Each structure stands twice: as C-alpha cells, then as structure tokens.
C-alpha cells in the first residue's frame, strides 16, 4: 500500500509540475549568475541579489518536494502546484498572481520601474494584502526610495527608457 501511495505521489501532476518549475527556476538562476559576470556592476547587482536571496529558498523547496512534504497552509503567494481543500480557489489565486506579474512586467516596460514598482507594491498590498492606505503607501514609498537612493544615486544605474514616456518626450 505504501509503495502504491509513493508511486502515485511521484507521478502526480503536482509533483512533476513543481519539479519542472523548480528546474526552470534553478536554470534561470544559473543562467543569470553566469551572464551577470559580463555586465557592468550596476546592471549585475539586481540579479545577483535576487539569486543570493532566492537560492536558499529554492533549495528548501527542492528538499521539501523530495522529502514528500505537503505545502503548509497560509503561505503567501500560493502559486504552488499542491491542491488543497479547494482546488478552484487555488486555481483562481494562481491565475490572479500570474496575471499580476504579467501586467507588472508590461507596465514596467511601458512606464518604467520608478513609477510602476512602487505603484504595483502599493496595489498588491492594499487590494490583496488588505494592509490599508498607510502601510501600503509606506511600502510603496520605501520601494521608490530604494530605487532612487540605492540604484540611481548610489550606483548610477542605467534604466531602460519607458516606451510611453519616450513617446511623449518625457525621457
């Protein structure tokens, strides 16, 4: 009986899908890390920081999947493959988060990091985190301060020219 349960676990869409996703994420980390050594220091900083912060969590998730542990309830960003008590709700959360990420990327491309990263953080915390105006605003402004203070003033980072602002002659 245990062997049959174990086989069902390893060949379930949840486990296979999550292992594929982890493999893609790990490959992306490796690709960005290797590629970042050819970039200027200001350009390489963001991917290296993301990799340094994300890699321990990546390893923890790989270990959790390989040890056959189940997702703990109440996780933020519930986009894992494990289906809990309400598969439709989990699917809706996955669609919501995936859509928000795509919209965020599109609006950053159109309007730039300085505008859309703080607004995006504010929106997500206010609407989905129910953090209220004050705390959502504080976090949004903190992201703006990070972009301007660390990247613009501290590292003299070069940003892409946002499409709409360039078309309007504002950059």
Image (cartoon, grey):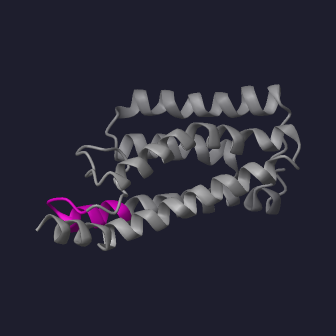
Give the residues in magenta.
Answer: 83-94
Between 162 and 27, the one lying in front of the other is 27
* Residue at point 44%, 63% (across, down): 19
* Residue at point 16%, 62% (across, down): 86
Specify the quadrant of the image occupied by residue 94: bottom left
| Residue 27 image offset from top left, x and y in percent | 63, 60
Between 30 and 120, the one lying in front of the other is 30
In the rendered picture of this protein, how many numbered marks are placed on residues? 0
| Residue 135 image offset from top left, x and y in percent | 41, 28
In the rendered image, the quadrant that contains the N terminus is bottom left
* Residue at point 56%, 58% (across, down): 25
Specify the quadrant of the image occupied by residue 66: bottom left
| Residue 103 image offset from top left, x and y in percent | 54, 62
Specify the quadrant of the image occupied by residue 75: top left
Between 100 and 19, the one lying in front of the other is 19
Examine the structure image and report whether residue 40 is included in the region drawn in magenta: no
* Residue at point 29%, 72% (across, down): 12
Vertical comparison of 145 with 122: above or below: above
Chief SS of the magenta region: helix
Using residue 140 as the reference point, say whether residue 68 is left or right of it.
left
| Residue 78 image offset from top left, x and y in percent | 34, 53
């Amino acid at each position: 009986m245990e062997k049959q349960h174990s086989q069902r676990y390893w060949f379930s869409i949840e486990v296979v899908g999550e292992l594929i996703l982890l493999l893609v994420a790990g490959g992306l980390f490796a690709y960005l890390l290797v590629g970042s050594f050819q970039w200027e220091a200001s350009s390489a900083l963001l991917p290296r920081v993301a990799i340094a912060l994300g890699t321990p969590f990546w390893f923890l998730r790989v270990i959790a999947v390989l040890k056959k542990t189940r997702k703990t309830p109440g996780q933020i960003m519930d986009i894992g493959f494990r289906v809990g008590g309400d598969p439709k709700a989990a699917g809706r959360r996955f669609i919501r988060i995936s859509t928000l990420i795509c919209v965020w990327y599109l609006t950053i491309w159109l309007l730039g990091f300085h505008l859309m990263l703080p607004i995006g953080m504010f929106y997500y915390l206010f609407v989905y985190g129910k953090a209220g105006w004050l705390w959502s605003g504080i976090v949004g402004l903190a992201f703006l301060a990070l972009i301007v203070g660390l990247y613009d003033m501290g590292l003299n980072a070069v940003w892409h020219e946002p499409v709409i602002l360039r078309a309007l002659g504002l950059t």
